[in-house]
Amino acid sequence: MKHTITLTDKQKTLFNSIRTSWFDIVSYLSEEEIKDSCESLCPQAFSFCTHDRDVDKDGNLKKLHTHIVLCFKTRKRALSLAHIFNTTELRAINTSVQLLGSYEYLIHQNEVDKVKYESSKRYVSNEQFFNDILLTSCDGKDDTLSIIDNIITGVPTRKLVALYGRDFVYHFNQYKEVAMAIVSEERAKKSTMLLEEVDVEDLPFD
């Protein structure tokens, strides 16, 4: 079945500028259409899971939708994928940490307040690929400290989301709490060092 999505000029510009190898996509097409579309693109690996029990903040059942993780060996433009999967809910995955987070989110594996989906509902085309991501970071990089340093130095949240993607959004509160704890500890340490440098006799005791 052919689908035609209408994109604004801003969306076209945005998706045309996104060019990467790994993507996180939400589509409202049928599972059969999604599987066929993924296979036709000949990716290195892909995985998807249809969410049919998600609820919004008011407890209402959300529209049936499917989360997709799509991985290529070479970079692709997001614009073509937006048309193929008939969606504007599409993000670039920039690191293996984000990729693992997106893969686990397919079944809400680490989400405390969301319905859990059975592993059997998650279709995986190349299980070894995702197992390798789980066992070792493909780029050998853990972004945690970088994220926390950027929060401490005041990097705008919008830029952080652009840099670190979905994983950052899902774990924002945890990152923020750790950043605040580090700032508090370093301030306390600095205050202690300043006090130690002051001669007791110079303090204004009555």
Image (spheres, rainbow, N blue to C red):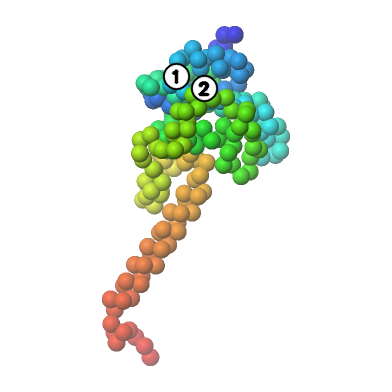
Mark 1 crowd level (few <14, some 14–19, many ≥20, 10 Å Cα): some
Mark 2 = which residue?
A: 125
Splitting the image into 4 quarters, where does residue 117 fall?
top right
Which amino acid does the dot numbered 2 rest on? Ser
In this view, the residue in front, 9 or 32, is 32
Which quadrant, please, contains the N terminus? top right
- Residue at image x 71%, y 38%? 59
Q: Which mark is residue 143?
A: none
| Helix, strand or loop status at disc 2 | loop
Mark 1 = which residue?
A: 43
In this view, the residue in front, 160 or 171, is 171
Could you say where residue 184 lies in the image, as x and y percent from the top left?
42, 62
Which amino acid does the dot numbered 1 rest on? Pro
Splitting the image into 4 quarters, where does residue 12 fall?
top left
- Is disc 1 in contact with disc 2, using a CB cutoff of under 8 Å? yes
Q: Is residue 20 left or right of residue 169?
A: left
- Residue at image x 71%, y 34%? 60
| Helix, strand or loop status at disc 1 | loop
Mark 1 and mark 2 lie on one chain; the one further toward the N terminus is 1
Q: Is residue 171 left or right of residue 155?
A: right
The residue furthest bottom is 206
- Residue at image x 66%, y 38%? 115
